[in-house]
């Protein structure tokens, strides 16, 4: 994983996933990212699956009115949300929260990678902030 930031779109995997998101016209790819990590919870969670779920949670939060990241890496998300004609289903919020919880488990490769960095605390603080934003929308 090529990462330059602890934020949801601060890595290559999330930005590649955003390219796929741009091609979609609904929240099915967001839900797919949540489903993949939730289904992986029984096993060791691959870092790429975790990165996509983290990015998907940010997209959901932004679609609901407030995210944690607003920079050049989220411009394509902003553009996608602007052209979208539907709102996300609120049933995605519990899936997003479950996905975010799984990011920091002992069976998460992404958690392991961030623990080896100097930005682990910032990464977990950002995850917690994203959880709070989503919980407020329940």
Image: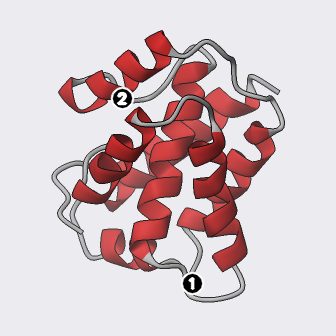
Image location of residue 59, percent across then percent down: 51, 33
Q: Quick check: can you spot residue 1?
A: yes
- Left or right side of 112 for 40: right
Residue topped by disc 1: 107
Mark on residue 69?
A: 2
Image location of residue 42, percent across then percent down: 72, 85
Up/down of 91 relative to 69, above or below:
below
**Label 2: element kind:** loop
Mark on residue 3?
A: none
Camera-side residue of 94 and 81: 81
Q: Which residue is drawn at 74% across and 24% down?
A: 136
Up/down of 91 relative to 107, above or below:
above
Which quadrant does the N terminus fall into? Answer: bottom left
Camera-side residue of 102 and 29: 29
Up/down of 63 relative to 38, above or below:
above
Q: Identify the mark nearer the N-term, 1 or 2.
A: 2
**Label 1: element kind:** loop
Marks 1 and 2 sit apart, C-alpha to C-alpha, by: 26 Å
Up/down of 95 relative to 26, above or below:
below
Q: Residue at x 27, y 76 (%)?
A: 116
Image location of residue 72, percent across then percent down: 19, 25
Q: Quick check: can you spot residue 6?
A: no
Which quadrant does the C terminus fall into? Answer: top right
Colour approach in the figure: secondary structure
Q: Residue at x 36, y 29 (%)?
A: 69
The image quarter containing residue 63 is top right
Q: Which residue is drawn at 56% across and 82% down?
A: 106
């Amino acid at each position: 994983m090529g990462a330059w930031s602890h934020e949801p779109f601060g890595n290559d995997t999330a930005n590649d996933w955003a390219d796929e998101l741009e091609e979609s016209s609904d929240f099915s790819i967001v839900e797919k990212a949540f489903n993949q990590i939730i289904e992986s919870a029984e096993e060791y969670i691959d870092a790429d699956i975790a990165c996509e779920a983290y990015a998907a949670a940010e997209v959901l939060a932004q679609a609901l009115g407030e995210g944690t990241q607003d920079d050049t890496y989220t411009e394509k998300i902003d553009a996608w949300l602007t052209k979208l004609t539907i709102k996300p289903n609120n049933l995605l919020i519990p899936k997003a929260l479950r996905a975010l919880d799984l990011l920091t488990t002992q069976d998460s490769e992404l958690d392991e990678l961030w623990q080896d960095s100097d930005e682990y605390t910032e990464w977990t603080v950002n995850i917690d902030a994203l959880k709070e934003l989503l919980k407020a929308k329940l």
